[in-house]
Amino acid sequence: MTMPHEIPPRSGVAFTLDKGQRLTVIDPKGEQVADLLAFARDDVAEVISSGRTLDYASRIYLTTGDRLYSNRSNVMLDIVDDTVGRHDFLLTPCSKDTFRIIYGDTDPHRGCFGNLAAALAPYGVAEDMIPVAFNCFMNVPVNGETGELTVEPPLSKAGDRIVFEAQADLVIGLTACSALQSNNGSFKPIHYEIAS
């Protein structure tokens, strides 16, 4: 049994995933969000798309059996197992500007956006190419009457996971989220495993 890879709190990584491989994202301690991005390996201008995916799914909460599409309407990832059932695909990765505008931080952390940009740069991904992430374990209820969004504590408990199967050769970006509100007030690691 191989040990999972660990992403330390408030950091991010990038790696490749081959078509057919499975990526398991694990919340080892509970209530910790992981921002996930996917790019086509042979052309990083093709990228995971919240808009396309939610349009085709006809709902905003995705789980086992749902597919994550690219901006070119190709399937990038299938969700093949999910022990939580609540993730967010509406909100953008947290950034220096998030912390400045929402939290009033005067010396803000670079956030998931900065962590993803740094990790993905060697693969040819520039900052302006970073889209809305699939936010594993993030709990964002929507008021059906007013459309108001709130960020609530994740429903994930220690050991919960979501498993994706790659439907193309991909470059993946993955974080242990840096926003206090998203993670119920504390920063924790994220684990991940890759299997053929």
Image: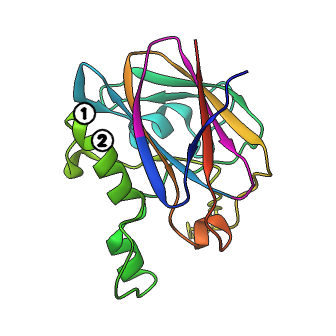
- Residue plotted at (30% across, 22% down): 41
Tag of residue 35? none
Tell me: residue 3, above or below residue 13: above
Identify the coloring: rainbow
Residue 143 in view: no
What is the x, y in percent for residue 75?
44, 21
User: Magenta span has 183?
Assistant: no
Circles 1 and 2, Cβ within 8 Å, touching? The answer is yes
Q: Picture quarter containing residue 45? A: top left
What is the x, y in percent for residue 90?
48, 53
- Mark 1 to mark 2: distance in Å? 5 Å
User: Looking at the picture, which amino acid does disc 2 mark?
Assistant: Leu
Q: What residue does disc 1 label?
A: 123
Q: In the rendered structure, which segment of residues is drawn in magenta? A: 14-31
Q: Picture quarter containing residue 67? A: top right
What is the x, y in percent for residue 152?
67, 67
| SS for callout 2 | helix
What is the x, y in percent for residue 103?
46, 83
**Is 104 left, or right, of 157 in this rendering?**
left
Q: Picture quarter containing residue 52? A: top left
Residue 61 in view: yes
User: Looking at the picture, which amino acid does disc 1 mark?
Assistant: Tyr
Q: What residue does disc 2 label?
A: 120
- Residue plotted at (29% across, 50% down): 118
